[in-house]
Amino acid sequence: MSASIVKITAGRVARTVARQAFGLAILACAVVSFSFPGCFHAWFGVKLTSLVVPAIQIIMFGMGTTLSLDDFRRVAKCQWTVFTGVSLQFLVMPLVGFALAKTFGLTGEVAAGCVLVGSVAGGTASNVIAYLARANVALSVTMTCCSTLLSPFLTPLAMKFLAGRFVAVDACAMFVSILEVVLVPVVAGGLFRRVFRRTLETRKAVCDRILSTVSMTGICFTILALTAPSRATFREAGALIVAAAVLHNTIGFASGYWLTRLLGRWLPLGETDARTVAIEVGMQNGGMAGALAVGVLGSAVAALPANVFSIWMNFSGSLIAGYWSRRPSK
């Protein structure tokens, strides 16, 4: 009996660690970069911050290779769910980021970074969390795709009207940057999938494993590259930024879930839809926010909220995935 109990306990511990491995890896990268900043300013004469944009482009290319026409057909079938999730993504999260920056007295580039991380599209990590939480993965991918395609238009708009109160924001430059960093790689990934469709489908398991590894590696790299230059700022306002990130993420999860449940009284939205929307709204694309902070705002300090948010959201997402996976929706 004791041996079986030990096996069951070990199995549960292993599954828990597996669910939170990504969040723990990101946390480890942040701690290492914060503790040894001199090691992550430049490698072989190349500044690591200059490689953040290419890293995000690779991640977006990988996302493009996972998309198919079925994802776009699904928009018509799940139009109310997709509309609810994307609307909350670009309405609630930017306003919450702005409100938290004002509430905590954040100014300048740090405040703009809080708005920025709330103004970007959903992150690809949300698809992994949706899978672990036994939510609707296909729907999560569809919402991520839709918010990503809309981000060149809606992210600069939100930044101009909200973050523009803290720093100067060139909306046109941000529009072009999002096209280069996000949309072009996604389209290129879609064309790659179309050309090599048979190879990708016959070796789907291997390709998915490679893409997930590349995405996780890319996100960890951005954490390493952007944490080191903003170490001094984190020492000064780290507690406030962490508090803002926790509240931002929590409000995203809660608003996505409960507003979807509320709308479910009149629209065909169920428990699984509510969980999926909650994950999608609560988990922003921190990598995209970091790339825009460096590429458009020209500030690694503005990328600090995105870094802190990425660390927390992956950890909290892992916790939610573990909770919901043990309570399948009816």
Image: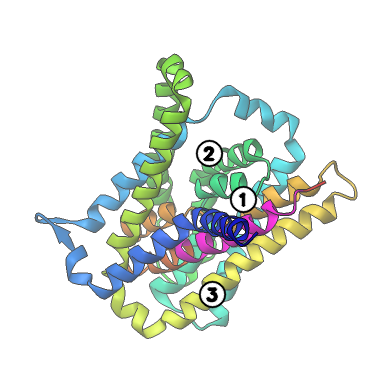
Name the residue at the left extreme.
45
The local secondary structure at tag 3 comes to helix
**What's the CA distance linking mark 3 and mark 2?**
27 Å
Predominant secondary structure, magenta span: helix
Q: Single out the mark in the foreground, 3 or 2.
A: 3
Q: Which residues are magenta?
A: 310-328
Q: Which mark is residue 280?
A: 1
Relative to 74, 309 lies left or right: left
* SS label for mark 1: helix
Give how far across and how far down residue 323 sits, in percent: 67, 59
x, y percent for residue 131: 60, 44
The image quarter containing residue 168 is bottom left
- Mark 2 vs 1, N-terminal side: 2
Which of discs 2 and 1 lies nearer the camera? The answer is 1
Q: Which amino acid lies under the numbered mark 3 shown in the image of this protein?
A: Ala
Q: Quadrant of residue 206?
A: top left
